[in-house]
Amino acid sequence: MLHIVTICGCGMGSSVILKMNAEKSLKELGIQAKLEVSDITTGKGAARTADLILIGSELAYLVQDIDKPVIQLISFVNKQEIKDKLKEYCEANGII
Amino acid sequence: MQKLVSINDVEINVSVTDWRDAVIKSGTILMNNGYVTGEYVNAMVQTVENLGPYIVAAPGVAMPHARSTNGVLKSGISIMTLSNSVEFGNKNHDPVYLLIGLAGINDDIHLKIMQTIATIFEDDTMLKRITSCQNKAAIAEIFNNVEVDE
């Protein structure tokens, strides 16, 4: 199962909204996934075991040293952007 | 069930000098309503200083917050519209005219608050109603009447 970690600065604001919107999008796309919320401190550890990282573009520089695929969101509250980018990732990686 | 947002959580047409002043005023509402300590308000400013203007979540809207360990006493929000917009330095979403201050611990209230905010962000009409509304009780009602998908 696809394992996704959503990351933000404190682990209680944008990453929570990102997770909710990603969950809805994945359900609509028919993809099963495990999602986890993390702040930037613990996020690096969580990211090592994940398949994919979701993060707002303003914070993306914080995960550039992690060797995992990263989806950057210009707006983490824009469900359509999240859905489009998840779909693109899943198609490119043979998940759908 | 207790309402998510009360009239005391809302301030309208607040005048601010810059983003820092805006974040402090947003945090002061949280503090005055017993959601956070004064330390948390400082941490809200530090979050932006350390990590940049990522808290500007959507065009015109910032969500200042810090970590729950920085002094959250209970989960809650503050909603503040500005009389003058301010720049946070977020190239995609400046200028900011609405601040939704967050205080969250890992509980059902925080989850419900975040579901409500996510739903409001999906609806530009609702965001416009909030920013143009001149009645604090009406703004609280908009938040309280949001139906979230479980």
Image: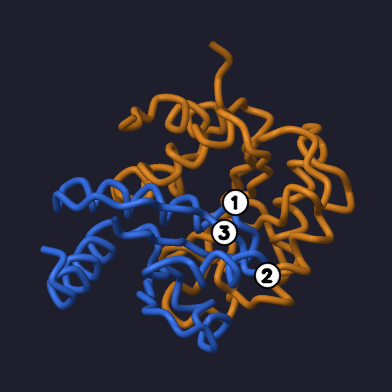
Q: Amino acid at mark 3?
A: Ser
Q: Nearer the viewer, residue A19 or B140?
A: A19
Image quadrant assignment for residue B65? bottom right
Quadrant where the N terminus of chain A sits is bottom left
Q: Secondary structure at mark 3?
A: strand
Of all residues, the one furthest to the bottom in this rendering is A65
Whole-percent x, y for residue A11 in the image: 60, 56
Above or below, B20 against A59 in this view is above
Whole-percent x, y for residue A5 in the image: 45, 61
| Chain for numbered disc 2 | B
- Front label number (3 vs 1): 3
Chain painted in orange in the figure: B
- Front label number (3 vs 2): 3
Above or below, B81 against B35 in this view is below
Q: Are marks 3 and 1 on the same chain?
A: yes
Quickly name the residue at label 3: A38
Determine the residue positioned at 61% across, 48% down. Answer: B80
Quadrant where the C terminus of chain A sits is bottom left
Quickly name the residue at label 2: B19
Quickly name the residue at label 1: A12
Q: Secondary structure at mark 1?
A: loop
Determine the residue positioned at 19% across, 67% down. Answer: A84
